[in-house]
Image (spheres, rainbow, N blue to C red):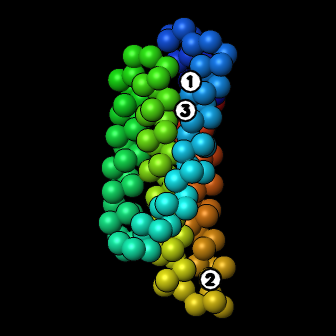
Amino acid sequence: LRRMIFVAENLNLSSTQYGIVVSSFALMKMMGNVPSAILVERHGRKPYLVHSLFLVGAGVAGIGLSQDWMQLSLCRMTIGLGVAALTTASTLTVADVSTPLSRASAFSPVMSAFAAGTAVAAALGGV
């Protein structure tokens, strides 16, 4: 949060612009879930596991190069789409390699890793 406030102050964002930048990630992740599931089912898991990471990386790199709030918002949207594809592909991959009886124990490391990554990123980012 502190980092985003720093960015908001450096780009002279209004409260509305800041709200759009912050919510653009979640909006695109939500809107990207169903199309990602359709594409992952159609084209396979592995391409989306790989390409989604490149999409996230491009969005993160773009954040560092953003000059205004629109560019920042577009980069956050890109990250949201990448995360939607990544979570969809990883969830379907785990479902494919597990049985109904072992599904819960197979999903727990994946879901724990997402939660741990969020917590560690906040801790290392100085929030």
Q: Which mark is residue 3?
A: 1
The residue sitting at 49% across, 39% down in the picture is: 77
The residue sitting at 47% across, 49% down in the picture is: 81
Disc 1 element: helix
Query: Of the residues under marks 1 and 2, which one precedes in the sequence?
Result: 1
How far, Cα to Cα, is label 3 from label 2? 33 Å
How far, Cα to Cα, is label 1 from label 2? 37 Å
Residue 74 in sight from this viewpoint: yes
> Where 30 sits versus 101, above or below?
above
Disc 3 element: helix
Q: Which residue is mark 2?
A: 103
Q: Which tag is nearer the camera, tag 3 or tag 2?
A: 2
Q: Amino acid at mark 3?
A: Gly
**Image position, residue 114 (x, y; %):** 57, 56
**Image position, residue 109 (x, y; %):** 58, 69
Q: Amino acid at mark 2?
A: Arg
Quadrant where the N terminus sits is: top right
For residue 66, which quarter of the picture?
A: top left
Q: Verify CB contact (< 8 Å) between mark 3 and mark 2.
A: no
**Image position, residue 76 (x, y; %):** 49, 36
Q: Which residue is mark 3?
A: 125
Q: Left or right: 46 with respect to 113? A: left
Q: Verify CB contact (< 8 Å) between mark 1 and mark 3.
A: yes
**Image position, residue 50 (x, y; %):** 34, 60
Which is more toward the observer, 99 or 115?
99
